[in-house]
Image (spheres, grey):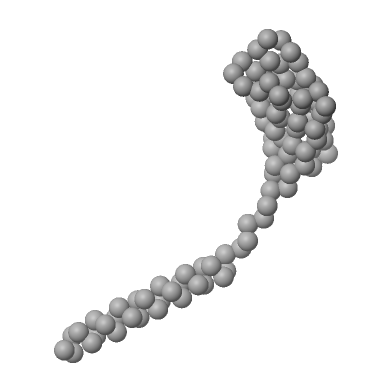
């Protein structure tokens, strides 16, 4: 009987410690800050936006066969940006249609 009481007390202590740990972690966990997003839409079908330090580009003909050429020489859909720097991109569809836009990093 004595061993049973000790085991019950041990289980209760572990349960209380676990609950306190969860509460402490939940209370002390910093709130995640939302990504700052700045978007510029162009009427010719190109949208550029920044999340964190990356600039992303989307066009109405994104997809297979679509190519990108940034003023930095990069050829991907997003690049790392420096604050205050201006970046431009030309997006070309697989059938040769092109749109161009620029964005200032923040």
Q: Residue furthest bottom?
A: 2
Looking at the picture, does residue 69 appear above or below residue 48?
Answer: above
When asked about the image quadrant of residue 93, the answer is top right
Q: Residue furthest left?
A: 1
**x, y percent for residue 105:** 79, 38
Residue at (61% x, 63% y) in the render: 30
The image quadrant where one finds the C terminus is top right
The image quadrant where one finds the N terminus is bottom left
Residue at (46% x, 76% y) in the render: 20
When asked about the image quadrant of residue 87, the answer is top right
Q: Who is closer to the viewer here, 42 or 12? A: 42
Left-right relation of 46 to 27: right
The answer to whether residue 26 of the structure is visible from this angle is: yes
Q: Who is closer to the viewer here, 9 or 58? A: 58
**x, y percent for residue 41:** 80, 33
Residue at (24% x, 85% y) in the render: 6
Left-right relation of 51 to 102: left
Q: How many marks?
A: 0
Looking at the picture, does residue 4 appear above or below residue 94?
Answer: below
Residue at (57% x, 64% y) in the render: 29
The answer to whether residue 53 of the structure is visible from this angle is: no
Left-right relation of 88 to 66: right
**x, y percent for residue 64:** 59, 18
């Amino acid at each position: 009987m004595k061993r049973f009481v000790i085991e019950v007390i041990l289980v209760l202590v572990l349960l209380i410690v676990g609950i306190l740990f969860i509460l402490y972690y939940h209370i002390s966990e910093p709130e995640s800050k939302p990504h700052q997003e700045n978007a510029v839409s162009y009427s010719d079908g190109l949208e550029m936006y920044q999340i964190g330090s990356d600039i992303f580009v989307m066009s109405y003909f994104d997809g297979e066969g679509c190519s990108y050429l940034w003023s930095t020489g990069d050829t991907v859909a997003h690049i790392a940006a420096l604050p205050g720097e201006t970046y431009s991109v030309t997006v070309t569809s697989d059938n040769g249609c092109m749109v161009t836009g620029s964005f200032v990093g923040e």
